[in-house]
């Protein structure tokens, strides 16, 4: 009974953090997590995930990465890569596009970015007239995807491009008026199925 009460309390803390975030009450969201620590409770991963998203939405990506570091010691219910994708998109939604680039660079020091992180970053690059950065990331990811197709089955070391990857690159190319690369990306998308 004590365990289920603790889990219920942690779920309530997660809901509180999310509610404070949606109401624009950053300090209250942070306080909710601090209250957990004061009670000697190590939160569940989703509490830190929501706090990280809240902080990034409000332009505090460095603080968010400190909170996300705590996920490494917890039994995370969502992989760290999903958390990084979530905070990048949250920073975009909060209008802190340049923070997204910093989060992506930080992310690469912690783990190999998965396709979700890459797609979120391509979206940011395309939205901010960073065509050359988008092109470089796309080509690197595409090369790694092609290497995966010819590698030993079951050995996955790099993310594989998907429809979102191609869609983001098409948008970035169109936005920058790089029609030749747009045609190239479109052909590659069709060839990859």
Image (cartoon, rainbow, N blue to C red):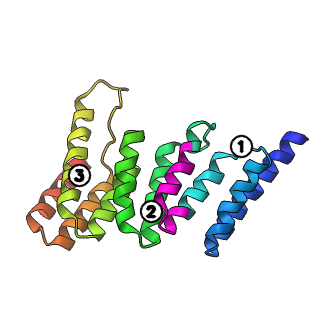
Report the disc number at residue 42: 1
Tell me the CA gap for discs 1 and 3.
38 Å
Residue 20 found in image quarter? bottom right
Give whichever of discs 3 and 2 has the lower sequence position.
Answer: 2
Residue 100: give x, y in percent of width and height: 38, 60
Residue 178: give x, y in percent of width and height: 12, 67
Q: Is residue 102 left or right of residue 56?
A: left
Residue 40: give x, y in percent of width and height: 78, 44
Tag 1 secondary structure: loop
Q: Is residue 128 left or right of residue 58?
A: left
Marks 1/3 in contact by CB < 8 Å: the verdict is: no
Q: Which one is nearer the viewer's eye here, 64 or 157?
A: 64
Work out which residue is located at the far left of the displayed protein and give it. Answer: 180
Task: Indicate whether 160 appears above or below 126.
Answer: above
Residue 113 visible to the viewer:
no
Crowding at mark 3 (Cα within 10 Å: few <14, some 14-19, many 20+): many
Q: Which residue is located at x 47 percent, y 59 percent?
A: 61
Q: Which residue is located at x 49 percent, y 63 percent?
A: 60
Q: Which one is nearer the viewer's eye here, 60 or 72?
A: 60
| Camera-nearest label, 3 or 2 | 2
Magenta stretch containing residue 58, yes or no?
Answer: yes
Work out which residue is located at the far bottom of the displayed protein and give it. Answer: 23
Pointer 2 residue: 89
Work out which residue is located at the far top of the displayed protein and give it. Answer: 152
Tell me the CA gap for discs 3 and 2.
18 Å
Work out which residue is located at the far right of the displayed protein and give it. Answer: 1
Quarter of the figure that contains the N terminus: top right
Give whichever of discs 1 and 3 has the lower sequence position.
Answer: 1
Pointer 3 residue: 138
Give whichever of discs 1 and 2 has the lower sequence position.
Answer: 1
Q: Which residues are magenta?
A: 55-69
Report the disc number at residue 108: none
């Amino acid at each position: 009974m004590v365990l289920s009460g603790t889990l219920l309390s942690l779920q309530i803390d997660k809901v509180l953090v999310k509610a404070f975030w949606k109401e624009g009450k950053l300090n209250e969201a942070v306080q909710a997590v601090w209250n957990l620590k004061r009670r000697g409770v190590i939160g569940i991963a989703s509490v830190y995930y929501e706090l990280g998203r809240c902080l990034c939405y409000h332009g505090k990506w460095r603080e968010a990465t400190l909170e996300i570091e705590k996920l490494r010691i917890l039994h995370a219910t969502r992989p760290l890569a999903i958390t990084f994708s979530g905070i990048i998109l949250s920073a975009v939604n909060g209008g802190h596009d340049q923070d997204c680039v910093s989060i992506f660079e930080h992310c690469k020091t912690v783990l190999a970015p998965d396709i979700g992180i890459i797609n979120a970053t391509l979206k940011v690059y395309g939205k901010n007239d960073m065509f050359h950065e988008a092109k470089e990331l796309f080509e690197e990811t595409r090369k790694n995807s092609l290497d995966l197709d010819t590698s030993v089955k079951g050995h996955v070391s790099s993310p594989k491009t998907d429809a979102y990857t191609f869609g983001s690159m098409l948008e970035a190319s169109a936005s920058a008026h790089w029609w030749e690369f747009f045609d190239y990306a479109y052909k590659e998308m069709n060839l990859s199925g």
